[in-house]
Image (tube, helix red, strand yellow):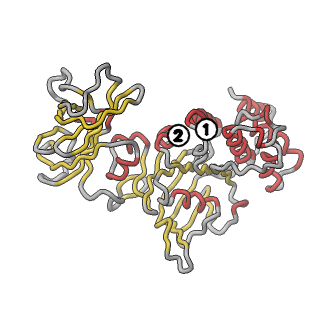
Amino acid sequence: MPASVATESARIADGSTPPARPASGIRFDNVSVAYGRHGEHTVLDSFDLTVEPGEVMALLGPSGSGKTTALRAVAGFARPVSGRVLIGGRDVTELPPHKRGIGMVVQQYALFPHMKVAENVAFGLKAQKTPRAEIPGRVSEALEMTGMTAYAGRHPRELSGGQQQRVALARALAIRPGVLLLDEPLSALDAQLRSGMLAELARLHRELPDVSILYVTHDQIEALTLADRIAVLDKARLQDCDTPQQLYRRPRTEFTASFVGTANLLPVTVRGKGVDFAGQSLTVPVDEEAAEGATATLCVRPHLIGLGESPGTGGHHNTLRGTVTEVQWRGSTHRLYVAVDGHRVLADVRELRETPALGDEVTLHFAPGDAALIPAGLTETPAGFTEDGFA
């Protein structure tokens, strides 16, 4: 048991009541944010989303999609022109940031260089007018949770980037927020540090199961690793929202398929219980409502495509034949780029002892259940879509 959890358990055991955290849970009620003298630049458009108490919700999207604006609306730094923001069921739309009971970590750390680590962590507590006698214990608790106890007497300049980010996280946790806002907190770290911090954030969430976390990122791996659900944004609007597994395996739109992981998106025509692609019949799951002859997009992830003839499973795999145009070695895998009747197909296959040469003719295969069919026209929010699915 982590020491911080043991400390909390000890408080309950001696009959003392641990300090209550502010209410958690976030509700975006049709929130729009616009800038410009006359509000002509909409940066968040009719955003409707609920983050449940204790849930990690990732906001994923390209630059300019509106994800950071949504987070700033919760923090109180971006004022909606319409709609409401609620935290723990309370309307906080007009409240200043310091009265919202939130903790926030940004990508540039935002530490005070002249203050030592412990002083940086205590800053929010002092701003909230926490009783002076409580501050040392709260600082120690936050540093312990983030593994920074040994660095309490150092200045930020004496720390690595990853350590500085831990201090920023400790400062946010010291106030015991009901809602934790993380704005691309790992983007300034190198790959190895990011991997370690992802594990630390996952551990912290297990220690703080009642805290709602809104995590803004453009990194798919971060979102897939940490989030209970992912909200996909593009062009200031919510495009999709579901669990990481569902968005990855059964994306509703072409945008989701291409942004949440890498995808092969192939134009097909519905034929009976399958589809036609480049004059070839493929067996894939087809919705009962799909009309015969309707156009659609077939989504198949590269790692689900194998090289060679269909394995010995009674011939139930689909096969594609094409020409190798590029080969990339990626350590544990080779990525093959294959031209199939004018369409590019990516296949991530285990490291090969003998790689195909450019221009070689190859056969690819994939299982019917590994493909997802996206109806034509679903490149933006489907009609009747809500954050919980289809109305």
| Displayed quadrant of residue 93 | bottom right
Does the image show residue 76?
A: yes
Q: Earlier in the sequence, mark 2 or mark 1?
A: 1
Q: Position of residue 211 (x, y in %)?
A: 62, 45
Q: Which residue is mark 1?
A: 201
134 horizontally vs 344: left or right? right
Q: In front: 299, or 340?
A: 340
- At x 46% / y 53%, what residue is drawn? 61
* Amino acid type indicated by mark 1: Leu
Which residue ends up furthest to the front in the rendered image?
358
- At x 21% / y 34%, what residue is drawn? 359
* Amino acid type indicated by mark 2: Leu
Q: Which mark is residue 226?
A: 2
User: Marks 2 and 1, Cα distance to the nearest angstrom?
Assistant: 8 Å
Q: Are marks 2 and 1 in contact (CB under 8 Å)?
A: yes
> Are there few (<14), some (14-19), or many (20+) residues within 10 Å of tag 1?
some
Q: Secondary structure at mark 2?
A: helix
> Are there few (<14), some (14-19), or many (20+) residues within 10 Å of tag 2?
some
Specify the quadrant that holds the C terminus.
bottom left
Q: Position of residue 291 (x, y in %)?
A: 15, 54
Which residue ends up furthest to the right in the rendered image?
133
Q: Which mark is residue 81?
A: none
Q: Secondary structure at mark 1?
A: helix
Q: Position of residue 251 (x, y in %)?
A: 34, 47
Q: In front: 171, or 306?
A: 306
Number of marks present in the image shown: 2
